[in-house]
Structure formats: C-alpha cells, structure tokens
Amino acid sequence: MAELKADVLVLGAGMVGVSAALHLQQRGRDVILADRHELAAQETSFGNAGLIECASVFPYMFPRDFGQILQYAMNRSTQVRYQFSDLPAFLPWLARYFLASSPDRAMHSAMAELPLIRRSLIEHEALMGEAGAPELLRRTGWMKLFRSEATLATASAELERARHYGVAGEVLDAKAIAEREPNLNGEFAGAVYLPAPGFVPDPGGLGKAYAALFKRKGGRFLVGDATTLQQDGRAWRLAGPDGAAVAREVVVTLGPWSDVVFRPLGYRIPLGVKRGYHLHLAPRGNAVLRHPVLDADLGFLLAPMNRGIRLTTGVEFARRDSPPTPIQLQQVLPLAHKLFPLGEPIDTKPWMGARPCLPDMLPVIGKAPRHAGLWFNFGHQHHGLTLGPAVGRLLAEMMTGETPFANPGPFAVERFG
Ligand SMILES: Cc1cc2nc3c(=O)[nH]c(=O)nc-3n(C[C@H](O)[C@H](O)[C@H](O)COP(=O)(O)OP(=O)(O)OC[C@H]3O[C@@H](n4cnc5c(N)ncnc54)[C@H](O)[C@@H]3O)c2cc1C
C-alpha cells in the first residue's frame, strides 16, 4: 500500500486543526491534515454559536456565589445542568475546576488568554480574506439580555472591569434594546451590547472554507482514525484506508477526543467536557434577528445563522459519550418562542457537541515532554471557534522556532505534572 510522507501530520480537522495546518503550511511545512470524517469541521466546530468572542476577556469559571452554586446543584437551572448518573465520572474534574476558579487563579487564566483573545478576530480576518469567504463574517457584535436588575448590575460591573482591557460595550435600556432588535418580546431590565465580536453565520462552512484554502495551497486532507497513530522510530505513522501517512511531527487537535492519543501515550491530562445542544428554527413571518442574542437569565442564545435561527443551550455536565439528553433544549424552547417569533424547527433532531475543557479553562498548547515530535493543541473550551487561527499561529511559531506572539508558558502541558 502507498505511504504518504509529510513534515507534519495534524490530527483532527476542526477549527483548531485546520487553522494549525494553514499556519504550518504558511511557514513552508508540508502538512497532512487527517480526520475521521471526509469533510472538515463536522463536529464541535460545526455546531457552536458562531461568536468570535474578542470581547470575552474573562473565561467561564466555576461560580463562587453560594446561591448560584446551590441552584446548579439542585439541577433546576437552564444555564447549567448535570446528568446525575454521570456524576461520579465528572465530580473529580468539577472539584479541580472549582479550585482553579478562585479569584486569583481565574485572573491568571484571563491574563494568560488575553493576548490570544485580542488576536482572534485579526487572525480570522486574515484567513477569511485568503480563503475568499468574507461573507462568513458579520460585524454585528452581540447582545446579552438581562431580566433582573441584579444580573444586569453584575454584568455591567463585569463590563466596567473588561473596559480596563480595551473592551468596548454599552448598557442598553428597554428602549435601546427595541431599537436594536425590534422583534424581541419580554420584560428586560436591560442588556449589554458588545460591538466588536464577529459573528459567523455558518461555523461549519467557515471550517470547510479554511480546509479548501489549505488544499488549494497544496495541503493533503486524509480520512484516518487517530487511534491508529503509532510512533515508528523517529516518525509517526497513521493508518488510513488508502495507506499510511508518515511524518516526523504530529499535532493533536482532536478537541474533546484528544485523549484517544494522549492517554495511551501515558499523559494524564484532565480533559473534561461541557456539552451543549442546538436546534434551528425558521423565523416566523418577516421577523428578523439582527444579532446573536443571549437571554442570560433564562440560559439560551439565539443566533441568526444562514440555516435559520440557531437556538443554542448552556452547559450540560455529563460524560462525553453518554447518549444525548437535550432536556435544556426542551426547557428553553417555549421561552425562545416567547422571546422571538419562531416558526417550525428546521432540524429533525437536536445537535449535540462537547466543549473541550481543562479545569483552568486554558488550552494545552505546546510540545509533549516525553515524545519527540509530538505536539498538543486542544482544550479551547467555550472559545475554540474564536481562538482557532490565533492558536494555530502560536503553535506554528513554536514548532518552527519563531518568537511566539504570546507567552506559551501558561498553556504548557507540564502544568498538570
Ligand atoms: C453549544 C456550543 C456553543 C459554542 N459556541 C461557541 C462560540 O460561539 N464561539 C466560540 O469561540 N466557541 C464556541 N464553542 C466552542 C467551540 O465550538 C469549540 O471550542 C471548538 O469547536 C473546538 O474545536 P476543535 O477543533 O478543538 O474541536 P472539534 O471541532 O471537535 O474538532 C475535532 C476533530 O477531531 C476529529 N476526530 C475525533 N476523533 C477522531 C479520531 N479518532 N480520528 C480522527 N479524527 C477524529 C473530529 O471528527 C473533529 O473534526 C461552542 C461549543 C458548543 C458545544
């Protein structure tokens, strides 16, 4: 059987893998990008809410407010839910997440990620320009609605804190909300409008546009199963249906499935998941949604995708591979109908995805310490669409010996011992 040789094998063609492959290619590396699917961006990078979150300075940490923790513990919140039968499987991870969310450590995570967040939209714009897909970026910003004065006050305070890091935003009253989004119905205490973030109305399409660019520039895309990866002397070998792919260096960009490579190699990395769901619905009549809108207190987001209005849920804690339990979707569906004139569902069943998360909400980016030629780039939590191109650049700079644009220290796998 044929053997394909390359400089680098990138495993996983989600937003993170495709972006890493492009940045390595830009630096002269011959790259093979491999995925178990025939197309790129068919998993988590397909189903997200489409926000390029360049205003999200503070990562989503475990809450420290006792009332909120109690509400989550009672499993009554639509924002966060957990599957009771899976609790023993993810409780140790939750404990680490809680410890990593102390104010000091949360601030450390925020400051470590800040250079990546700041770079996120710039890097996307560059790749979209090259890919010839500028229509996949809308410069609408997005809006977070609050129904109680208390949650609005917390969000306004957070905006003030974020302003110190260059984030622009506006607090809107009910009249200003109606001007921005005339078709919303409900009683709102107010909203926070963030003008800078980009919105991608087809995140899966964007991943595919980047993969098409990679192929146009001579990159090879293969179907292959990462579980077949083997170290063969100084090379790495991946089995594929049409023969093996062989390279001196391999990059793991398998998102929530990255453990299928690192675990057999002996790395104990606490990769967990926060699952989420989406469903597309048609807008009713001539109703138009201009921006992605988060109903923060009720725990869902509506985004005006090319396919229809994408209703996206908050977080579900469960094992990655447990069967879908779209209870949050069922809970918020009638609330979404009240918020915006929605018609029939477009999808026949809800989509489920898993945000790949480390307890400190920072990705793992860099060299694997015990295996020559093995590199990691996974765990981009709620921000993988946002960060893909920026972390692709960072990793490629590290691999090719350039001075990295951001300090990669906080992302090193060694932080887990
Ligand atoms: C409901 C929801 C909403 C979100 N909203 C946003 C948002 O608005 N903005 C944002 O920035 N982020 C958002 N995210 C997070 C974002 O989607 C993820 O962080 C990001 O998609 C992760 O990208 P990835 O490339 O690491 O993983 P993935 O996109 O999952 O890619 C991993 C790839 O690995 C492949 N693979 C898996 N196993 C194997 C195997 N054995 N062999 C070969 N290939 C394999 C898969 O097929 C897949 O293509 C959201 C996530 C969810 C679930």
Image: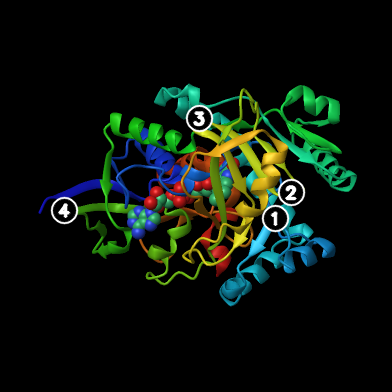
Residue that label 2 marks = 298
Judged from the image, the secondary structure of the residue bearing numbered disc 4 is loop
Mark identifier at residue 306 = 3
Q: Does the beta carbon of the residue at mark 1 sit less than 8 Å from ligand 1?
A: no
Give amino acid for label 1: Thr
Give 334 or 73, whichever is nearer the viewer: 334
Q: Nearer the viewer, mark 4 or mark 2?
A: 2
Q: CA distance from mark 3 to mark 1?
A: 26 Å
Q: CA distance from mark 4 to mark 3?
A: 38 Å
Q: Mark 2 or mark 1, which has the lower sequence index?
A: 1
Q: Quadrant of the N terminus?
A: bottom left
Judged from the image, the secondary structure of the residue bearing numbered disc 2 is loop
Q: Determine which quarter of the picture holds residue 368.
A: bottom left
Residue that label 1 marks = 78
Total labels: the figure holds: 4
Q: Mark 4 or mark 1, which has the lower sequence index?
A: 1
Q: Residue at x 66, y 65 (%)?
A: 97
Give amino acid for label 2: Leu
Q: Mark 4 or mark 3, which has the lower sequence index?
A: 4
Q: CA distance from mark 4 to mark 1?
A: 47 Å
Q: CA distance from mark 3 to mark 2?
A: 24 Å
